[in-house]
Amino acid sequence: MNPTWRKPFGMAMILLLIVFWAGLVGKLSTYVAHWPALAQAPFYLFAGIVWILPLKPLLRWMELGRWRA
């Protein structure tokens, strides 16, 4: 089995995704801070989970070399 460039590139993409998402949520938090606490909780719950969605196809591509199953 020969090493491929997909795994290092995929790891870099995951790190970029995390940095981008954290920056976006951090930027939005200035507006969300004015919301009531019961409205902030679902926003942060959603923001904490939704960044995981693009990981499955990215991890599949890193391992198999294709985006779909």
Image (cartoon, rainbow, N blue to C red):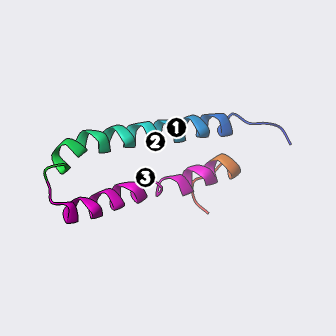
The residue at the point 61 percent across, 34 percent down is: 9
Q: Position of residue 51 (x, y in %)?
A: 43, 52
Q: Which residues are magenta?
A: 35-61
Q: Position of residue 25 (x, y in %)?
A: 31, 45
Residue on which disc 1 sits: 15
**Mark 2 and 3 residues: CB-CB less than 8 Å, in contact?**
yes
Q: CA distance from mark 1 to mark 2?
A: 5 Å
Q: CA distance from mark 3 to mark 1?
A: 12 Å
Answer above or below: position of 56 versus 38: above
The residue at the point 15 percent across, 60 percent down is: 36
SS category of the residue bearing label 3: loop
Residue type (three-letter) at the residue carrying disc 2: Ile
**Mark 1 and 2 residues: CB-CB less than 8 Å, in contact?**
yes
Left or right relative to 30: residue 65 = right
Residue on which disc 2 sits: 18
SS category of the residue bearing label 1: helix
* Quadrant of the rendered image containing residue 38: bottom left
Left or right relative to 17: residue 8 = right
**16 vs 48, nearest the viewer:** 48
Sequence-first tag of 2 and 3: 2
**Overall secondary structure of the magenta section:** helix
Residue on which disc 3 sits: 51
